[in-house]
Image (cartoon, grey):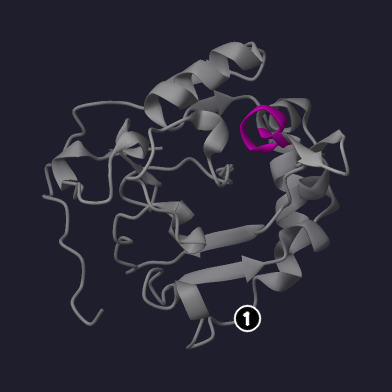
Amino acid sequence: MDQLPEAFPSDYKPSTRIAELSASASIEEILSVIDRDGGVIINNLVSSDELGAIESELEKSTKGKRDEDEGFFKDLVPQETILIGGLVGKSDTLARICEHPVLEALRKEILTDHGTRRVEKYDLPFHIDPLLSVSLSFRMQYGAVRQRLHRDDGTHLIEHESKPYRLNNAAQLGCLIAGVQTTQANGATMFIPGSHRWDDKREPRLDEVTFA
């Protein structure tokens, strides 16, 4: 990917916004918005004290430079962005946040697989719990271009054409925690509400993008 992604017009204003709910909202309400839009902003899930603690716990990990080859991230994340992996092993605070009751409930409803397994004349019920696959920090530095629009479940080679969308068939659930006030200018996550229901032939347009 030698060519840089197209830049947003300098006067770009999103035509839509991401729905916001409080962390005290019911799980059913949060699930309903995720099912409809593909994502939601949950306010007050993490306190300012917790954010400060995470920053302190990660301070010694922020001094390094980005490796030239970052595997999957090499052609997706600009070199001006510092990646810090293995966060749950570096921040006890973040590890505790991963067990927040809201996140636990969402994982249970979206990612837990239930079924039966035939064992000699008997259907044995079972379930498969979700696993944490990535805990990663993005630190955008000055001059970084935007990422190309993409689906995160591409890391699992998921295709979106052969069967109808169902939330509880999702391959993953992402939770992004903003350590600072995010804006379009400083690298806020790009998001297109409803795009989780597209097939793989549908290309995103910049004028559909809003920011988290």
| Residue 42 appears left or right of 48 | left
- On the image, which quarter does residue 96 sit in? top right
* Residue 113, magenta (yes or no): yes
Outermost residue, front side: 121
* Residue 60 % position (x, y): 75, 71
* Residue 59 % position (x, y): 72, 65
Residue ID for mark 1:
64
| Residue 1 appears left or right of 12 | right
Dot 1: few (<14), some (14–19), or many (≥20) neighbours within 10 Å?
few
Closer to the camera in the image, 58 or 18:
18
Span colored in magenta: 107-114
Q: Is residue 90 visible?
A: no
Say above or below: 22 vs 150: above
- On the image, which quarter does residue 178 sit in? top right
Question: Which quadrant holds the C terminus?
Answer: top left
Q: Main secondary structure of the magenta part?
A: helix
